[in-house]
Amino acid sequence: MNIWGKGKRSALVTGGSRGIGAAICRRLASEGWGVVVNYARNADAAASVVAEIEAAGGNAVAVQGDVGRQQDRQRIVAAALDAFGQLNALVNNAGITSVGRRDILEATEESWDVVFDTNLKGPFFLSQIAAKEMIRMIRSGAQSEGYIVNISSISAFAVSTNRGDYCISKSAVRMMTKLFAQRLADEGIYVHEVCPGVIESDMTAPVKEKYDRLIADGYWPIRRWGTPDDVASAVATIVSGAFSFSTGNCFLVDGGFHIRSL
Ligand code: NAP
């Protein structure tokens, strides 16, 4: 059932139940967006993000679906349209790290397949489905524009030999962003990449000590962990339309990690 009024914007955030995705959901809801909180397995976490948003006076629905599965992708977008009647932004945030973090000489095809399904194939084909719906609604006048924001990683350019599949999947997200940006600009849909550095979340919890040491050693200029809110702030600014003559950009949220020094 469409619970949303004409002229109000709505966003689908994949992996919105925890970490960076949950922060994006909370931030967009606080700015008046209707939010679809997608999750794969953790229904309780998604429900608590929805409850938090509603308690603050916002609008959100939780939608289960594995972005790596074709039938789920169709269902997620259909549920988003059903809830809010339009789709102004897709945030491809859901992602997983390499299974077992094995050295590339020991890496498995099982890890490769699930990492690529989640981090690359899912976002690519979800963007395809969402873009077609956005085009339909822009042409009919139901909405004026659309955004797709892809969450990549500094692993798109920084080598970790124990996470080869993750690094390669994230570097491909960069080309995917440019492809959709080129194809969709004439349709009024703008596509960007947000590239986080080391962010405090469940994903990085197992390697917390390593990153604590790197921060203490000044491995990146801004000596602290990034927060999910740091990333959410960048996404919210992009979909606000603040960058009105831009598409295909990569916005680094990495504490300056990308700067090389001698
Ligand atoms: P996280 O804390 O592990 O949360 C991952 C989220 O993705 C959860 O909501 C999870 O849902 C969902 N998810 C996982 N597989 C899914 C699937 N197949 N379909 C739908 N949802 C799925 O991760 P995070 O640290 O917030 O990372 C979010 C994104 O930022 C990822 O793309 C990651 O690669 C990227 N990133 C993270 C960092 C970092 O330092 N944390 C740095 C750079 C980039 P469930 O709760 O149901 O499992």
Image (cartoon, grey):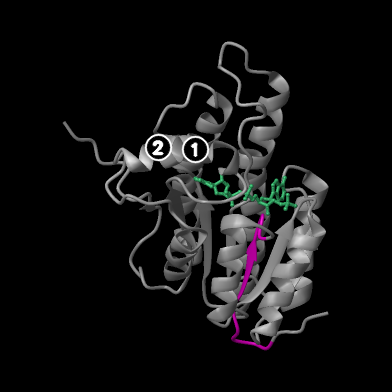
Q: In which quarter of the image is residue 136?
A: bottom right
Q: 113 above or below 63?
A: above
Q: Name the residue under label 2.
A: 213
The residue that appears at 35% across and 68% down in the rendered structure is: 243
- Identity, as a three-letter code, of the amino acid under mark 1: Glu
Q: Residue 51 got which mark?
A: none
Q: Looking at the image, which residue is at 61% across and 53% down?
A: 127
Magenta stretch: residue 7 in it?
yes
Residue 259, horizontal then vertical, whole percent? 25, 41
Q: Does residue 135 appear anywhere in the picture?
A: no
Q: Is mark 1 within 8 Å of ligand 1?
A: no
Asked if disc 1 and disc 2 are in contact, CB closer than 8 Å, the reply is: yes
Please name the amino acid that badge 2 sits on.
Answer: Arg
The quadrant where residue 55 appears: bottom right
- Residue under the image location 77 percent in, 48 percent down: 66
Q: Which residue ends up furthest to the left in the rendered image?
A: 262
Please report the bounds of the magenta region as a residue range.
5-16
The picture places residue 34, in percent across and down from the top left corner, at: 65, 77
Total residue callouts: 2
Residue 125 is one of the magenta-drawn residues:
no
Residue 211 x/y as whole percent:
45, 39
Q: Is the magenta stretch mostly helix, strand or loop?
A: loop
Identified at 70% across, 65% down, the residue is 37
Q: Name the residue under label 1.
A: 209
Nearer the observer, 200 or 139 = 200
Question: Helix or strand or loop: what does disc 2 sit on?
Answer: helix
Q: How far apart are marks 1 and 2 (CA)?
A: 6 Å
| Mark 1 surroundings within 10 Å by alpha-carbon count, few (fewer than 14), some (14 through 19), many (20 or more) | few
Note whether 235 is above or below 222 in the view shown. below
